Amino acid sequence: MKFIRKLFTGSFALLILMISSGVYAQTVPGKDEAMDEYSKLAGAMVFLLVAFLFILFFVLSAPKYKYSYERKQERYSFLKKLSKILNRAVPIEQEKDIMLDHDFDGIRELNNTVPPWFNVLFYGTIVIAIIYMIDYHVLGSGSVMVDEYLQEVKIANEKREELIRTGAFINENNVTLMTGADDLEKGKQIFMTSCTPCHGPDGGGTVGPNLTDKNWIHGGGIKNVFTTIKNGVPAKGMIAWQTSLTPKQMQQVGSYVLSLQGTKPSVGKPPEGNIWVDSVKTGNDSLKATDSSKVKIDTSKLKTDTAKIKKDSMKVK
């Protein structure tokens, strides 16, 4: 093998030398056609030399390949023996010894034993089932899927509450009214910066409606006010503030707007929309919007009904 390596090394050096000389012959001016013939002859000699060396390498390596084939045969024999141990397979020439007597259309059955690997898996599942039952249902050290699910739901709810508390997960469904002085002050600053051109510095209304009375065009309460601030009212010229304010800021300014209820602005616009009745104050499950004129009519009907009751009571007497 050392001799072959030396031959390869020498041939490689000779190949480089011939190629470089051929290139030099092509690049240096003044050379005649004899130099071109020399480079072609050198290339042919290199090709023949490399081919000879490859043939020599395979001829000298033949015993090694034979040895490798024998090793593969030994390895195959070992795997065959291992398969026989794991499967308890009966050789084909001995299958007649385990042939059963019954016959079905010329088809007969072999009485092979169950492979050991299958028995290991089968009894292993039984052992695992026993360990699982003791761990999860007797000792209770493990959590079954229901417990894991409930634990994950609990963690998710805690994260959700944290996001809501920090203002990162506030929307129309979970927004709450803020009453803290700091939050209302921040809401006031936002109102003075962004809302006064349409609603006035005291909420009495200019282009936009009066925010200090009980009437609301798009619904009162923190959820409706938050939704109006978030989506805006493009038909009336109010932009959607969700692109400029964070959910926490919209909650703060909405809470500040609701804190203006009942205040007396210097110049207030007449009421617009319907009177808003909050379920928190009335105890009803739904939020109801009633018109002020309807309230007056209902009051007159109530007085009429009261007069009728008095007349009926007089008749009874």
Image (cartoon, rainbow, N blue to C red):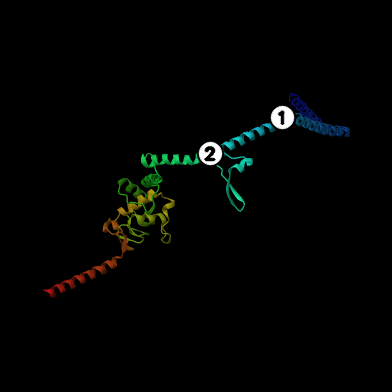
| Position of residue 160 measured from the top left corner of the image (x, y, whole percent) | 38, 47
> Which residue bears the numbered disc 2?
116
Q: Earlier in the sequence, mark 1 or mark 2?
A: 1
Q: Identify the residue at horizontal 29%, vertical 68% (top origin).
A: 294
Q: Secondary structure at mark 1?
A: helix
* Mark 1 residue crowding within 10 angstroms, few (<14) / some (14–19) / many (20+): few
The amino acid type of the residue labelled 2 equals: Pro
Image position of 180 with respect to 266: above or below: above
Q: CA distance from mark 1 to mark 2?
A: 38 Å
Relative placement, left or right, of 249 versus 28 is left
Q: Quadrant of residue 145?
A: top left
- Where residue 310 appears, as percent x and y from the top left, is 15, 72
Q: Nearer the viewer, residue 7 or 93?
A: 93
User: Within 10 Å of the Cα at label 2, are there few (<14), some (14-19), or many (20+) other Cα atoms?
Assistant: few
For this orientation, the residue located farthest to the bottom is 315
Residue 109, numbered circle? none
Q: Mark yes or no: residue 270 visible.
A: no
* Nearer to us in this view, 127 or 1: 127
* 227 is higher (above) or lower (below) than 27: below
Labels 1, 2: front one = 2
- Residue type at mark 1? Lys
Answer with left or right where residue 27 lies relative to residue 190. Answer: right
Q: Nearer the viewer, residue 93 or 283?
A: 93
How many numbered discs? 2
**Outermost residue toward the left in this view:** 317
* Dot 1 and dot 2 residues touching (CB under 8 Å): no
Question: Is residue 241 among the parts visible in the rendering?
Answer: yes
Residue with the mark numbered 1: 64
Q: Position of residue 191 (x, y in %)?
A: 36, 51
Q: Secondary structure at mark 2?
A: helix
Residue 298: x and y in percent read 25, 68
In the picture, measured across the screen, residue 170 lies left or right of residue 283, that is right
